[in-house]
Amino acid sequence: MKRAGLLLFAVAAPVATAAVYLVSGGSSDDSGDGAHKKPATGRPYDDGKSATEKKADDELIADLPPGLAAPAKKDLAQKLVASAENSTLNWRGQYGYIEDIDDGHGYTAGIIGFCTGTHDLLTLVERYTKDHPGNGLARYLPALRKVDGSDSHQGLDPGFTKAWRAEAGEPAFRKAQDEARDRGYFEPAVRLAKLDGLGTLGQFIYYDAMVLHGPGTGPAGFYGLREAAMKEADTPAQGGKEKAYLDIFLDVRKKAMSKEKAHRDTTRIDTAQRQFLYDGNMSLKTPLTWKVYGETFKVP
């Protein structure tokens, strides 16, 4: 999953179990509180949907604006996340990042905080090795499989961190990290936000939640948090008001974060996402100024 970088130290997001991935979809609407057609199903993810339902969802989003999926907005999303995770806007400088931050998930690494203990790092290296046999991380696959689900370094020390940093210099490995981020986090979050009738800001709020909480169906995972929010407010696709729904969703996130020592500083919500929401910036128009952990960030 992903680390939560503070100004003075970094800590990791909780493990989210039962990850469910979606297929990337079209685009979104930036109309603020504007109503949308109701999606074919109210399920929180594609698991169990029929081919007919998935087709209906695809048709629903096909004619909408790109929203967060537009290249410039996607880059902005990465900067916003990096400001909260690593106290920087230079998200491309994080491919070679790796350390154990003592959160119980082993090593945390790369642009989305893939962890040796939460399966996503293992999946990344397996896919990368399939396409690029003999890479510098391939020899660690047996050890990665053994430590998956734990905080152990057995079989990884002392060379794995050096190998990761070295491999991050390879364009193919950076591309593999991008693809893993998109497949597991960005695309499912943006797709579901579109089906919920959310504009660009709402899509980002979903994406940031997916990164921090993980794509899990339990109460601490992204899908569980969404379900909790939907018990208190209707999504725009259900006829609710977008600002009201997102306000509730952020409340649910804050409550979940307050239960984790690593996430009790909720400025990524309070002085960033909530600020954008209350300012009515539903399309994340730039220039943009926000604060995280007291530090000010600006995008022209």
Image: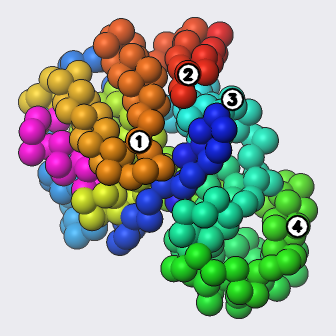
Mark 2 vs mark 1, CA separation in Å: 14 Å
Query: What residue sits right under mark 3 in the picture?
Result: 89
Q: Residue at x 44, y 36 (%)?
A: 265
- Name the kind of residue labelled 2 in the image: Gly
Residue at the image point whose x is 36% and y is 9% from the top:
279
Q: Nearer the viewer, residue 273 or 203?
A: 273
SS at circle 4? helix
For marks 4 and 1, give the one nearer the viewer.
Answer: 1
Q: Nearer the viewer, residue 69 or 217?
A: 217
Q: Is residue 94 magenta?
A: no
Number of marks in picture: 4
Which circle's residue, 4 or 3, is located before the other in the chain? Answer: 3
Label 2 sits on residue: 294
Q: Are marks 4 and 2 in contact (CB under 8 Å)?
A: no
The one of 99 and 1 positioned closer to us in this rendering: 99
Which residue position is annotated with label 4? Answer: 162
The segment highlighted magenta reads 222-235
Q: Earlier in the sequence, mark 2 or mark 3?
A: 3
Please tell me which of labels 2 and 1 falls first in the chain: 1
Q: Residues within 10 Å of mark 2 (few under 14, many from 20)?
A: few
Q: Main secondary structure of the magenta part?
A: helix
**Residue 38 drawn at (x, y percent):** 14, 39
From mark 4 to mark 1, how far is it between C-alphas?
A: 32 Å
Residue hosting label 1: 264
In percent of width and height, residue 143 lies at 70, 87
- Camera-near label (1 vs 3) is 1
Residue 232 within the magenta-colored segment of the rendering: yes
